[in-house]
Amino acid sequence: MRKCYFDYVATNPLHPQVFEAMLPYFKEEFGNPLSLYEAGMKARNAIENARAQTAALVNSKPSEIIFTCSGAEANNFALRGIALAKQNEGKHVIVSRMEHHSILNSARFLEKSGFAVTYLPADKHGVVEPEAVKKAMTKDTVLISVIHASSEVGTIEPIKEITKIAREHKVIVHTDAVASAGNIPIDVKAGGVDLLSMAAHQFYGPKGAGALYVREGLRIVPLIYGGIQESGRRAGTENVPAIVGMGKAAELAKLEMKERGEHVKKLRDRLISGVLSVENVYLTGHPSDRLPGHASFTVEYIEGESMLLLLASKGMYVASGSACSSKALKASPVLLSMGVPASLAQGSIVFTLGKENTGEDIDYLLAEFPPIIKRLREISPFAKGWDEKEQGNKCYTTSSEQQTE
Amino acid sequence: MRKCYFDYVATNPLHPQVFEAMLPYFKEEFGNPLSLYEAGMKARNAIENARAQTAALVNSKPSEIIFTCSGAEANNFALRGIALAKQNEGKHVIVSRMEHHSILNSARFLEKSGFAVTYLPADKHGVVEPEAVKKAMTKDTVLISVIHASSEVGTIEPIKEITKIAREHKVIVHTDAVASAGNIPIDVKAGGVDLLSMAAHQFYGPKGAGALYVREGLRIVPLIYGGIQESGRRAGTENVPAIVGMGKAAELAKLEMKERGEHVKKLRDRLISGVLSVENVYLTGHPSDRLPGHASFTVEYIEGESMLLLLASKGMYVASGSACSSKALKASPVLLSMGVPASLAQGSIVFTLGKENTGEDIDYLLAEFPPIIKRLREISPFAKGWDEKEQGNKCYTTSSEQQTE
């Protein structure tokens, strides 16, 4: 049976060159980067090299990169670290409803700690409108966090516009670029954000390595206290091989970004038009401003998990919503915030493509997908009688619009 | 030139069998453990297997193990997570002055957050006296954190006695076992602690993997919020290869602990008696209740860094104080808390042995060490004229006592 991995947003396979770069640091070069002798110095140099490579990916200075162990850690660090550092200036934070749980749950933690949090809605395409950001701001606002691109619906947010508004009010901007960094061009200097999170395993790097860009001069309270690693801003013995891997993956991503992007975009466009030819299937997220390898849909009368499992039985690996909530089996809060009704949100399915995917993978998917949907609808209790009832539904209309845009 | 690694407390080389166990999870089995299809399931199973292996090392249930990315993260998580969970019962925390910076600096963070913290002193051997714990307790005390064994002076603390006292007052006990777990037997059920931190790279496992044992039923506030990983208690895409490596390392450590311990203890005892035959060199830490591979000293009239660099020039890698502060070049707070005067604390040197060390390594060290000390003292400004002045010094007496015990 053919095997097709269509879940790059969950995690990427490690690039062989990345693995090669990591290898020496497992074995010969196992020293602790803080040790003063040669083995420590070699590990230290390897980390600084990776820092420069990672910085180059987003056009920051190396000293503005703090390594973490995951995108989630970077998000927690950014939100709580800035809120704490700025709490004497104001205790209001703005996040969008498009955010990952690591932002939303950090925001809830801040609420428990006495901060006020505004949760911004998105439009039907998952776009957080800059105007809404403007309206939400108060004199107490110290931080805005809006995702760079949604891992669930692929929408790329208007961060530059949001940052411009924030700048006028001297409010700090963080963006969670876990799904986008390494996949689309990012320039923190041109974009103007103050903090940006990334995760290596989203661009063919290893699990266990992430980073937070923190603009020079910006004070941030550590999330993990301890030794003097990362200039005292993030403690813990460095995972040298993973950091080296992140650097190498960043270097390769920068080098191959255009080629990789064009490759997946071409496949994605075929996938989208093929999948949408099935009845009562709707694209979620923005029709054009979306991640190049990202194709997400809602399928009426069917549960996402059933599709996922039947596709898996045919060797195709896809997601239903974000990886971090896929086992939670709840309707995606992101889709709900976009106005998708709960019943339709249950039928969410997300295909994300990577450099290993081929045209044959798409052929295979497009041949197998329609009969799977047909079969599931035949056994679905929701499909019977719901058809007419839902015809006039707002969401149905909304989704049809998306289809034709 | 002979190469001798005497800095196992900074980090351990990866066990070849551990690396073999990790390998498949970098390549073929790269799935996200939260994905619902087969690749996710395999990664999930690998993590649960590692959890059982890690639990067995300290005699806990698998469900009581939360994976982290480092010992420092586990320490931050324990201290702040319990303090927050218990803050309505009281806002007083006790830590010892023997603690690692990840505990001390977390305690300072708690102070800034409105908690009162008592820092317990240690005796001249680095022992935190249970009686001192008893005296420090107030009706507001919710948590006590005392290190299991010191990475700087090797002393194994009387955790069982401390826990007994805490139990009587219904106070939670955390112990930082980063330097000891995997190296000496630990039984959380017999020992009675509520939380215990470990780090894989301290027992031939990979960097980037740590764990916190949390006694069943004990509520802890997360340090990293996000997805539903680790039962919602610690978010972030799991570093599957590192976790698998930690499990394998734990399994091997349990299996080989006795043999490894006897091997390093024999070498260490030769090392200690050899090094102490040099004039004005004193053992730090407890003479008998110490980690089997740990030998730490203060050398009068010399700076630790000079010794470290000269030994390194002869191919011998040692530490001067804890790895996390070795680049800070400050007198060790741990030594100062034990009553070692600052001038002598500057001459700290720490040898830590592992299973790769041989009798020839010790021969080489004992041949090279005395001439290095002689040479350094010849050029030391401190050695001239300080001799007589320091003779009556309290610390000198203290250290002499240690030598003869």
Image (spheres, coloured by chain):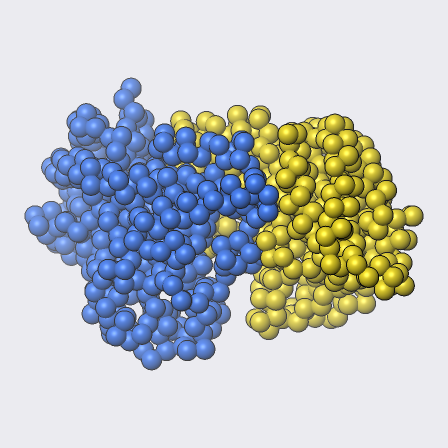
Chain colours: A blue, B yellow
Residue at the spot 74% in from the left edge and 62% down from the top edge: B342
Left or right of A100, for residue B238: right
Task: Give the residue displayed 14% in from the left and 49% down from the top.
Answer: A288
Outermost residue on the bottom side: it is A139
Report the label total.
0
Residue that appears at 55% across and 50% down: A236
Q: Is residue A341 above or below residue A33?
A: below
Residue A77, percent from left and from top: 45, 59
Left or right of residue B330: residue B164: right
Relative depth, front residue between A76 and A224: A224
Residue B131 vs residue A214: left or right?
right
The residue nearer to you, when weighing A137 against B215, is A137
Q: Is residue A102 visible?
A: no
Quadrant of the drawing holding the N terminus of chain A: top left
Establish if B125 lies above or below B362: below
Visible in this render: residue A184?
Answer: yes
Report x, y in % for residue A222: 50, 61
Residue A346: percent from left, percent from top: 29, 46
A262 or A291, nearer to the observer: A262
In the rendered image of this protein, does residue B239 appear above or below residue B152? above
- Considering every residue shown, the one lying at the far left of the view is A404
**Residue A345 at x, y percent in the picture:** 26, 49
Q: Residue at x 56, y 43 (%)?
A: A40
Classify residue A133 by image quadrant.
bottom left
